[in-house]
Image: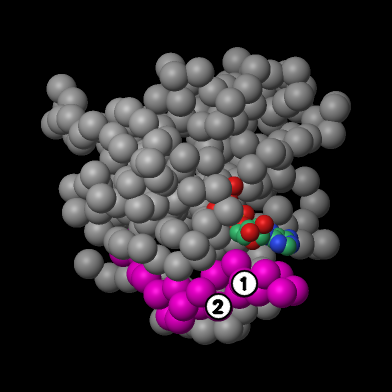
Amino acid sequence: MSAILEVENLELCYGVIQALKGISFHVNRGEIVSLIGANGAGKSTLLRVLAALNPKYEGEVLLDGTDIHAIPRKSLAKRLAILPQGLAAPPDLTVEALVDYGRYPYRSWRTIGRSKEDREAVAQALAETRLEAMRTRQVMSLSGGERQRAWIAMALARQPEYLLLDEPTTYLDIAHQLEVMEIIKRLNREHAMTVIMVLHDINHALQYADEIAVIKDRQIFSTGTPHDVLNVAMLAEVFGVCADIFTNSQGAQVLSPVSLVR
Ligand code: ATP
């Protein structure tokens, strides 16, 4: 399988705070990769670097073998979409206008109105996320789950090769968490979209990710399939918890935290 992203010896500091130390890993095309780790481990910082949003690092980030910062911004913007945490929209912005905003890399000052491709991409993104009936609603009037689907639709309208998501299920109830995870899985399987997502729910990572990168103290602790990385020792060392590990009815491993490590 070919690597779409390669990260070599990445070091990043915010002033005196070292947020990433010697990070090396790669992401294969068409995979779902989850970044997991404790609060403050460096996950969001790494995700932002992979989206070329934080250029002040040492080391290499290569997209298909090319330094991510050597790729013209508009070309890069067509290839990737990122959903950071805690997004907010202007109060009067409708769902359709938000989703249409995802098309901005395809526009230029010469573009007047929306092209046929724009209209089709927006319609497809609304359909994929089951938001057609809500297209005229204001984004900020939606429930948390609907709003998260609207942000995902905006990213989809761009038709990116890879999608970066920072904790996409935060604040959602368990049904809406699964709904968002299923949308992400479908995009990955049906559109061969590479997905890299920060997840706090390790059970979601275990169930949906092809590969997991565990981050501890701003460094890679381990990488591999869910089966490779999940074990009692990792949970104790990285998260400081004792946990039971089971296999669920779908054959996925799941964990149940039992106590803090003493
Ligand atoms: P969480 O799970 O809590 O969201 P995280 O693993 O995503 O955490 P980061 O947000 O990447 O962690 O932060 C890594 C470290 O860098 C933390 O110590 C954090 O305080 C620090 N940090 C992050 N952003 C900045 C910033 N803009 N300026 C200074 N320090 C920062």
Residue flagged by tag 2: what amino acid is it? Glu
The percent coordinates of residue 168 (x first, y second) are 53, 37
Which tag, 1 or 2, sits closer to the chain's start?
2
In which quadrant is the N terminus drawn?
bottom left
Left or right: residue 22 versus residue 74 is: left
Viewer-closest of 80 and 74: 80
Q: Which mark is residue 18?
A: 1
Q: Which mark is residue 11?
A: 2
Q: Residue furthest front?
A: 262
Please state the extent of the stretch shown in magenta in the rendering: 7-30
Q: Residue at x 29, y 51 (%)?
A: 234
Viewer-closest of 148 and 167: 167
Left or right: residue 100 versus residue 240 is: right
Could you tell me what secondary structure mostly forms the magenta stretch? strand
Q: Is residue 169 above or below residue 115?
A: above
Q: Quadrant of residue 257?
A: top left
The percent coordinates of residue 40 (x first, y second) are 58, 53
Disc 1 from disc 2: Cα separation: 8 Å
Residue flagged by tag 1: what amino acid is it? Gln
